[in-house]
Amino acid sequence: MSSEFWKETMVGHQLFDLSGRRALITGSSQGIGLALAKGLVSAGAEVVLNGRDPARLADAAARIPGAMTLAFDATDHEAVRKAVDGFEQAHGAIDILVNNAGMQHRAPLEDFPAEAFERLLQTNIASVFHVGQAVARHMIGRGRGKIINIASVQTALARPSIAPYTATKGAVGNLTKGMATDWAKHGLNCNAIAPGYFDTPLNAALVQDATFSAWLEKRTPAGRWGKVEELVGACIFLSSDASSFVNGHILYVDGGITASL
C-alpha cells in the first residue's frame, strides 16, 4: 500500500472504521450472528440480517438502527444466488460477508442419525459455499471484499457426541483457506473466527448443565463461558482495513482452550 494510505489511516481507530460499508450476516436473528451485527453497526457499518424466518428477522432488525433484512435459506444454492444477485442490483454492494448460519446435533457417533448428519453438512458447510460463492462473484468484480466464516473450537478439537459437527467445522476451516487461496488475488480477504464455548441459544443445554459448566470452567484457562460480545472485536478487525494482509487465517476466540492441555 502507498505511504499516503498509512499517513491517513495509521491513526487510532481509523483502521477499524467501517463507515460506508455494508455487511451481510447469515443466521443473524439471534445469538452470535445478532451480536456480530450489532458490533459491526457500532463500527459504522450498515448490516443486512439473514435467516429463514422473515418475522424473526424483522424482530431482530427492530433492535438495530438502520438494519435491513434478506430472508433466504442458506442451504439452497439457487435461492441464495437469486437473493444475493437481487439485493446487489436493488441496493448496491455487499462489502462484508459473515457466514454464521449453523446448527448442532448431539448423539453418540454409533447411533448418530443419518438425516441429522446430512442437515449438519448442509447447514454448517454447504451454506458457507453457497453464500460465499454468490457474494464473492460480486466482490471479485469490484476487486475488494471481506469474507468471515464462523468456525469453532471444534475446528481443531473433538468432544464425545458431536463428531459430525466437528467434521463440518473442520471443513469450514479448510474451505476458508481455499477461499483465500482462490480469491486473495482478486482483492478479497477470507478468514474465519473460531469461537470457543459461548453462552448462546445453540449451547443452552450445556449452559444449564452444572456438571458440564464446571468441567468447562476448569478446562478453559479463562475459567468461564465466553460472552457473545467478546467476538465483536475479532469481527471488526477482520472486516476492516486493519486486516488488509490477513488471509486464510483462523482466529480462535476461546479463552485459551486450544492453547492448553
Image (tube, rainbow, N blue to C red):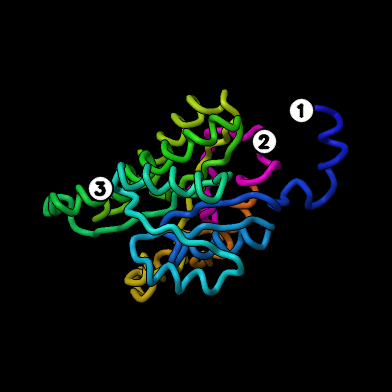
Are discs 2 and 1 less than 8 Å apart at CB?
yes
Question: Residue 167 at what x, y percent from top left?
Answer: 30, 43
**Amino acid type indicated by mark 3:** Pro
Residue in the foreground of this view, choosing between 38 and 23: 23
Q: Which residue is mark 3?
A: 164
Q: Which residues are magenta?
A: 238-258
Q: Residue at x 82, y 34 (%)?
A: 5
x then y, percent, for residue 150 = 46, 49
Based on the picture, tell me whether residue 241 belongs to the magenta stretch: yes
Residue 61 - label: none
Q: In the image, what residue occupies the spot 37% across and 42% down? A: 81
Residue bearing mark 1: 1
Q: Amino acid at mark 1?
A: Met
What secondary structure is found at the residue carrying circle 3? helix
Q: Is residue 19 left or right of residue 85?
A: right
SS for callout 1: loop
Does the magenta segment cover residue 191? no
| Distance in Å between CA atoms under marks 3 and 2 | 33 Å
Residue corresponding to mark 2: 244
Could you say which is closer to the camera, residue 206 or residue 175? 175
